[in-house]
Image: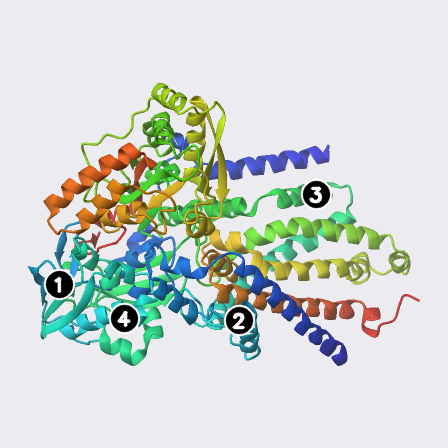
Amino acid sequence: MKKQKWIALLLVCMMIILSACSGGTSTKNDSKNSSKYSGENSAVKRGNELAIRVAGDPQNWDPIDTFLLSWSTVATSVFEGLVSRSLDLEIQPGLAESWEYKDEKTIVFQLRQGVTFHNGEPFNAEAVKFTFDRLLGDEGQKGPQYSNYTSIDNVEVTGEYEVTMHLNSIDPVLLTKLSGYGAVIVPPKYIQEQGAENFDMKPVGTGPFKMTDYQRDKQVVIERYEDYWNKDAVKLDKVTFKVIPETATALAELQTGNIDIMTRLEVSQAATAEGTDFIELMDVSTPTAYSIRFDTAQEPVDDVRVRQAINYAIDKETIVKEILAGYGNLISSFQSNLSFGYNKDLEPYPYDPEKAKKLLAEANIPEGTTLEFFIPGTDGTFKEIAQAVAFYLEEVGLKASINSVENTTFQSELIPQGKAGHMYKNGWGGWTLDFDNTAYLMYHEGEFWNPSFKNEKVEQLLAAERATIDNDERQKVFKELTEVLYEEATEVNLYSEVEIYGVNKRIKGFQPPHDGRFRFEGVTVE
Amino acid sequence: MLSYILRRLSHTVLVIIAVSLIIFFAIRLTGDPVSIMFGAGEPSQQAVEELTAKLGLDKPVWEQYIIFMKDLVTLDFGTSYRSNSPVLGMLLERAWPTIALALGGMAVALLIAVPLGILSAIYKGKSIDVFSRIFSLLGISFPNFWLAFMLILIFAVQLKWLPVSGFDGFSSLILPSIALGLILSGILVRLIRTSMLEVLKMQYVTTARAKGIREWLVIIRHAFRNALLPTVTFVGLQFGGLLGGAVIVEQVFSWPGIGRLIVDSINQRDYPVVQGGVILLALIMILVNLIVDLCYSLINPKIRTGRGDN
């Protein structure tokens, strides 16, 4: 008798606990009924300071040593390049007020005057030269950024506030690249006197905020730089980036007001976040594209008909609608529609299982042929997509065997060595927002990320696109290139990513960045 | 006693050599760090070679190992590939949060398990015993990430009593400690109960009772002390495990612990950090084992003097 009473009591306790939690653990299906959470907005106590969740820590703040988004999320406020990219992705003057192409391989930059680094060191032509000498010299060559800037031969000081950049080859994407990570201007004296190791941990730039505290894997604090050349645009006193790897934890922090902005909110969390009075969701399209890439060296996907058939067999629209709750844009080439070179006239392969079956029959593919499909083990969303893909393939008589593998090995060994099965998940950041970089690395014969695909026409077009800085001409080349790739069906283009931000409503004027690089000019708090 | 400790410490050298051999070669099987460091770039062959040489990875692997061991003797754990910082410094930064969490988890486990274990042994078959058995079953079965999220949702989001995550003072230690400790206490309760039950059957307990010693004194001094031996071993081993193995809890609570550092470093193939971290954990484990063995002799003097039962 007593025993039963205890068990009953325990069960009641459990139920109370579970019911208390239901508001926060809602999944996509039950989330619409989740209870409204209306605690006080304790974020207000932070006043004119922001706290932002970041998922990772780049470990090293030297711009030539990194290629991580987690670097630029923070460092875009600390460093500046000669040019910068606005939130609307327009190239605009940065530390250079203007520039002029003397010829296709020579650019003269007029530099902004009266700019200082956070340590007080003056910004001038010497600093620009130092930056590029460092990037293109021995030190830079040992880092991941160098390869983006190999078209620059050297930078010459032609005045105290004027530099001339000499190129060794035509580079139509150069200006975009100059707004990229590796080309931000660094302080010569500071690095020479304090050493590169110190710079890794205590970076100094010319940006609107200076880094005042960095605790590895915990937090980064940036504070307003009072001598910033455009300081009127900056209203916030301080921004703290907190490293919170787990998204569920990050959502809890957002709900309790401990952070103001949560990046990378998951689709399944959207309803819970919206259920909190003081949180609003913002979404923004990103340049990141996802596809299922074929290894064209492997039978039977070496046959273009099979690749086209698979493209027809998969209902991409339903995948985006059901698995991503609509947070994704359909694409017809391996780039987002933000990217220069995106072909708007090209529609994605329609869902047509009958046509798929016909193509497979033409190619003499026996029913039940198994395709090895490799995906990284850590990506839950893509696992769901892979299962949907397997289902669609089965509908047309193919079998997909899904292999979930460790991400690092997948990226750095299996794909490059052509060991990732017949097809594999491919994701690409496309940071230059120009198809040039993506197309070259993906389809040029012998590239690290391209173990098997080769095509004469594609090679010609890739070369043609790089041979001119005339963007109308390049647009035409890209149009043709995307059409050839579409016919070749080198991959199943799935979608370009739409990122969801959870934002505390006390923040005004915040625009989520397409490229993940936060800008705080014009952001205020209530 | 001193010669015992010295003898034990001399074993340490052998263990460290064995551990270093295993981790040094095992981590090299995971792949090449240089390709990861270049990311999506197109490094020239020369750049790859230069970086490989800079990291010392161009030398034969045995030579690399000898260099590594030579440095280790002088407590030089090398430099992280990712951050360019000295590994020892990175590990020490994490040492305090890691130890605090392990101690916190252990404290929670003991505070729950010791009284509950003793009570359920004394009142075997009674309601408290049933409760403790259900408790330990739940404790063992709950996945700790689930428990961690539940704790966050209840105590941080709904009740707002405690911070959600982070490493900021005592209050931030409470939830992760409970998440770690509750699960551990599930096993510990069972262990204490079983050993208490065994000891309570012993003649010396009956004798003590016959002498008219008060019951709680019999239980604490005569029974519990003897029942402690297996518990101490278990607690010692678990404590070592908590130091490096609390990765999931560290992840959920954004805790800057050694476990997370090692896992991140494995993913990035940051060899020096993985090697240093594993060796440091092995050292701590050895130290904890030594302390456990010393505790034995405090609890049971027979072990100290090396005398047998007869």
Residue B133 numbered tag: 3
Element class at badge 3: helix
Q: Indicate which disc residue A466 carries.
A: none
Q: Looking at the image, is mark 2 or mark 3 nearer the viewer?
A: 2
Residue B131 placed where, x, y %?
68, 42
For badge 4, the amino acid type reads Gly
Task: Determine crowd level at label 2: few under 14, some 14-19, many 20+ residues with C-alpha closer than 10 A.
Answer: some
- What residue is shown with label 1? A230
Q: Amino acid at mark 3?
A: Arg
Which residue is tagged 2?
B64
- Both on one chain, marks 3 and 4? no
In the rendering, at what x and y percent does residue A509 appear?
Answer: 19, 49
Q: Assess whether mark 1 and mark 4 are in contact (beta carbons under 8 angstroms).
A: no
Q: Which SS class for mark 4?
A: loop
Give how far apart the Cα atoms at labels 1 and 2 are: 51 Å
When asked about the image quadrant of residue A161, the answer is: bottom left
Q: CA distance from mark 2 to mark 3?
A: 53 Å
User: What residue is disc 4 on?
Assistant: A137
Side of A74 where B216 appears, left or right: right
Using the image, name the chain to which the residue with label 4 belongs: A
Q: Nearer the viewer, residue A274 or A515?
A: A515
What is the C-alpha distance between the residues marked 3 and 4?
A: 67 Å
